[in-house]
Amino acid sequence: MRLLLVEDSARLQATIALGLRKAGYAVDVSGDGEDALWRAREGSYDLVILDVMLPKMDGLTVLRKLRDAGNATHVLMLTVKDHVNDRVAGLRAGADDYLSKPFAFDELLARVEALVRRRYEKKNPVVRIGELEINTTARAVNCRGEMLALTPREYRLLEFLAQRVGEVVSRTEIEEHIYSDEKDLFSNAVESAISVLRRKIESAGCGPLIHTRRGLGYVLQAA
């Protein structure tokens, strides 16, 4: 899942981005409103984490411009302002959630997870495909009662496919939503990752679940 983090404090930006990447998210960062607006318009994000107090253009203005342009990307607002009127202004401008500083990272992560589920219209944090169970809250995968040992990126790839179970997901979409660092995108990065993930699932006795649609992409579904 690809996130855009907009925070002008270099220290806080680095801390949040590191935590989100450790959790397996692909994260782009921005430190001012004008750059954030451009990135949000041009990129394909599952969620924008947007600070209110920003140089060049404040977060509420960024949000209003996105909504006025028809951009429906989910937005989580971050702010030191904790008055009811401030929260109301953010929500009425089109924010999907609101988190006041200071906050615990675990709460931020939980809100991110919930908004990503909402992005794909999934209320239940547990997704089941055949005998495979994916718990998006615990970030754990269970196959026939046994836990699968997945790397953070393998898990996010599986979760991304699971959020669109039964749909064909293209290689380009996977690249955009899973990989945050272009140096990791060698020529067959997606094919290699799919191959490893497919092998782990099938070795555990839950496959085949990931199917290749030649020239189109990949689909996760029970046979």
Image (spheres, helix red, strand yellow):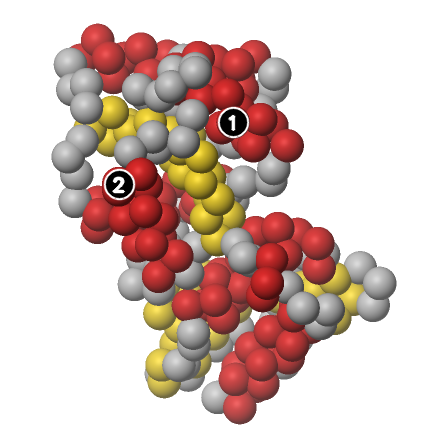
The kind of residue tagged 1 is: Asp
Tell me: residue 119, above or below residue 157. Answer: above
Q: Amino acid at mark 2?
A: Leu
Residue at (44% x, 55% y) in the render = 25
The picture quadrant where one finds residue 82 is top left
CB within 8 Å, label 2 to label 1: no
Task: Residue 35: give its label.
Answer: 1
Viewer-proximal residue among 36 and 198: 36
Density class for disc 1 (Cα within 10 Å; few <14, some 14-19, many ≥20) is some
Q: Is residue 170 left or right of residue 129?
A: right
Q: Is residue 182 visible?
A: yes
Task: Point out residue 195 in the picture as x, y percentages from the top left corner.
Answer: 64, 79
Is residue 128 something that shows in the picture?
no
Q: Position of residue 102 (x, y in %)?
A: 15, 34
- Say which residue appears at 61% left-offset and 51% top-offset: 176
Q: Which mark is residue 7?
A: none
Q: Residue at x 44, y 35 (%)?
A: 30
Q: Is residue 209 above or below residue 153?
A: below
Residue 188 position (above or below residue 27): below
The residue that mark 2 highlights is: 12
Alpha carbon distance from label 2 to label 1: 18 Å
Q: Residue at x 41, y 38 (%)?
A: 5
The answer to which of marks 2 and 1 sits earlier in the sequence is 2
Which x, y percent locates residue 38? 58, 26
Residue 85: percent from left, percent from top: 21, 9
The total of numbered circles placed on residues is 2
Q: Secondary structure at mark 2?
A: helix
Question: Tag 1, which secondary structure?
Answer: helix
- Quadrant holding the C terminus: bottom right
In the image, residue 137 above or below residue 97: below
